[in-house]
Amino acid sequence: MEQSVKEVSKNLKEIREKRGLSLDQLSELTGVSKSMLRQIETGKSSPTIATICKISNGLRLSFTALLRKREFQVEVKQFRGGPLLTDDSKTCRLFPLVPFDPHQSFETYYFELDPDTVSSGEPHQGDIYEYVFVIKGTLEVSIEGKTFKINENEFLKFEANQPHVYKCIGKKMAAAIMQLSYLA
């Protein structure tokens, strides 16, 4: 079997299973028959460009998401080991941990805020959730006039399409893992 057909077979099955879809449900989403999808997943049929387009459109994936070879990678990284993004006063520090990739639906940052410091977050465009996992200190997050206190070992989830403000309260620096999740 040609390498690209193997990748399509493997990727399609993996994506379908990760999303908890049956072949019937996948057929309904994509407009491709259940029998054709089964043949593609088992490598018994080589999909046409039109079929791959239907599948990728139905699953809201890029065309290449079905074609690319997925390589298993293992990385151990320091939270502060990547590029540093700061505000003008250098009291707010952001380190990208898992940068945005169009093949995944999230990005992750390590975030530090000095005591009694405020940092404003601009509204994000689209259906985006922000998760803030506090690992050190205490943060206050204000969203639409409401303030939420997040202590060490707690997290906050909110729709990030509105203005939000972070404040470090207490005498020590606050540190958090911040994740942006993009909905399809």
Image: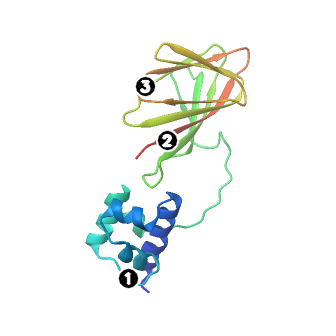
Identify residue type, mark 3.
Glu
Which residue is under mark 1? 45
The N terminus lies in which quarter of the figure? bottom left
Q: Secondary structure at mark 3?
A: loop
Residue 110 lies, in percent from the top left, at 61, 36
Give residue 65's quadrant in the image.
bottom left
Please report contact status of discs 3 and 1: CB closer than 8 Å, yes or no.
no
Q: Residue at x 33, y 77 (%)?
A: 47
Task: Decide which of 162, 168 is in the foreground and name it.
Answer: 162
Task: Decide which of 24, 60 is in the foreground and name it.
Answer: 24
Report how far apart the C-alphas of labels 3 and 1 lie in the structure: 48 Å
Q: Is residue 123 above or below residue 54?
A: above
Q: How is colour applied across the structure in the image? A: rainbow
Which residue is under mark 2? 181
Let me know if residue 61 appears in the view.
no
User: Residue lying furthest left in this view?
Assistant: 50
Q: Secondary structure at mark 1?
A: loop
Q: Residue at x 48, y 62 (%)?
A: 15
Say which label, 3 or 2, has the lower sequence index.
3
Which residue is under mark 3? 122
Report how far apart the C-alphas of labels 1 and 2 lie in the structure: 35 Å
